[in-house]
Image (tube, grey):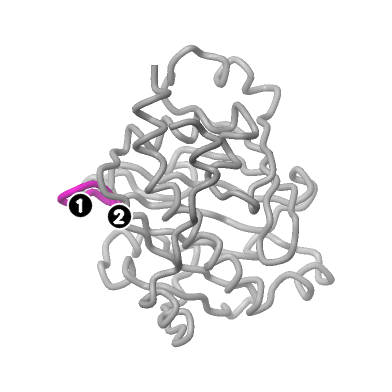
């Protein structure tokens, strides 16, 4: 299928169990410093919702089953899609506007085939809630982010896509993000965490951004974009990987 055809298909609906979980909104306030607890605890891995932390920041949690997808496909996707706007747009049509990467990473993204992960920077433009945001995401290896590779290996977690998120192309950093991929019998389970506002220092911006509405909007956005990705990624990978 062409990307234009994939963009025209209907988006997945939010599952009723996710909507119910967001209404009940009972999750554990796992601190950024305690992030490895998520790798160890299946109850934490299943949590969906958001909660305000003691420092005024928010923790946002979401899950998404990704059948028939491997860690290699996910790694390829995060290298392949920043190379063209339409590749980012097809991930979440009408919510993802465009993307580019840092000029220092030009050699990495211009390889003919996926060269393996290196720390790299994306500049996506997307809408969360009603806000159009030009972002900067500095992707790093899990160990640099504070995850234990030993704990990952011991708990069937082959891949974590994690990074530091900023607004206005990195002029203001605000969030720590981790997408944890756990192996299942038929693919992967995505366990997402956003420590929203963890690195935001400006008191005026904290008051404007750190709200229940923003946290819920991020949870809803994550829910739909990754369910859509789960549908289209096997098709894109089979067509484009070579």
The residue to which callout 2 is attached is: 189
The residue positioned 49% from the left and 60% from the top of the image is: 224
Whole-percent x and y of residue 176?
Answer: 57, 56
Residue 184 is marked as 1
Callout 2: 10 Å neighbours few (<14), some, many (20+)? many
Query: In this orientation, which residue lies closer to the viewer: 20 or 61?
Result: 20
Residue 24 inside the magenta-drawn segment: no
Tell me where the magenta segment starts and ends, as one range.
Answer: 182-188
| Image position of 198 (left or right of 172) | left
Q: Quadrant of residue 214?
A: bottom right
Does label 1 or label 2 sit earlier along the sequence?
A: 1
Snapshot quadrant of residue 87: top right
Q: Outermost residue, bottom direction?
A: 24
Q: Nearer the viewer, residue 117 or 124?
A: 124
Whole-percent x and y of residue 178?
A: 47, 53
Per the image, label 2 sits on a secondary structure element best described as strand
The structure residue drawn at horizontal position 50% and vertical position 29%, both measured from the top left corner, is 79
Judged by its main secondary structure, the magenta piece is: strand
How far is mark 1 from mark 2, CA to CA?
Answer: 7 Å
Give the class, few, some or many, for how many residues have Cα within 10 Å of label 1's Cα (few <14, many ≥20). Answer: some
Whether residue 64 sits left or right of residue 135 in the image: it is left
Please report contact status of discs 1 and 2: CB closer than 8 Å, yes or no. yes
Q: Secondary structure at mark 1?
A: strand
């Amino acid at each position: 299928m062409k990307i234009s055809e994939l963009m025209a298909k209907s988006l997945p609906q939010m599952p009723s169990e996710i909507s119910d979980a967001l209404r009940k909104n009972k999750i554990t306030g796992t601190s950024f410093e305690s992030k490895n607890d998520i790798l160890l605890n299946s109850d934490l891995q299943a949590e969906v919702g958001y909660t305000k932390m003691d420092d005024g920041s928010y923790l946002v949690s979401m899950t998404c089953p990704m059948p028939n997808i491997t860690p290699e496909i996910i790694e390829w996707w995060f290298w392949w899609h920043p190379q063209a706007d339409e590749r980012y747009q097809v991930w979440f049509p009408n919510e993802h506007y465009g993307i580019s990467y840092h000029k220092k990473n030009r050699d990495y993204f211009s390889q003919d085939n996926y060269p393996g992960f290196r720390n790299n920077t994306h500049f996506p433009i997307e809408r969360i809630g009603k806000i159009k945001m030009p972002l900067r995401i500095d992707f790093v290896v899990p160990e640099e982010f504070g995850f234990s590779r030993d704990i990952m290996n011991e708990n069937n977690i082959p891949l974590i896509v994690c990074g530091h998120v900023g607004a206005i192309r990195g002029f203001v950093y605000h969030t720590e993000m981790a997408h944890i991929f756990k192996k299942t019998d038929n693919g992967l389970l995505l366990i997402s965490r956003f420590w929203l506002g963890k690195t935001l220092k400006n008191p005026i911006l904290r008051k404007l951004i750190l709200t229940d509405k923003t946290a819920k909007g991020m949870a809803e956005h994550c829910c739909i974009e990754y369910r859509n990705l789960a549908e289209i990624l096997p098709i894109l990978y089979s067509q484009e990987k070579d």
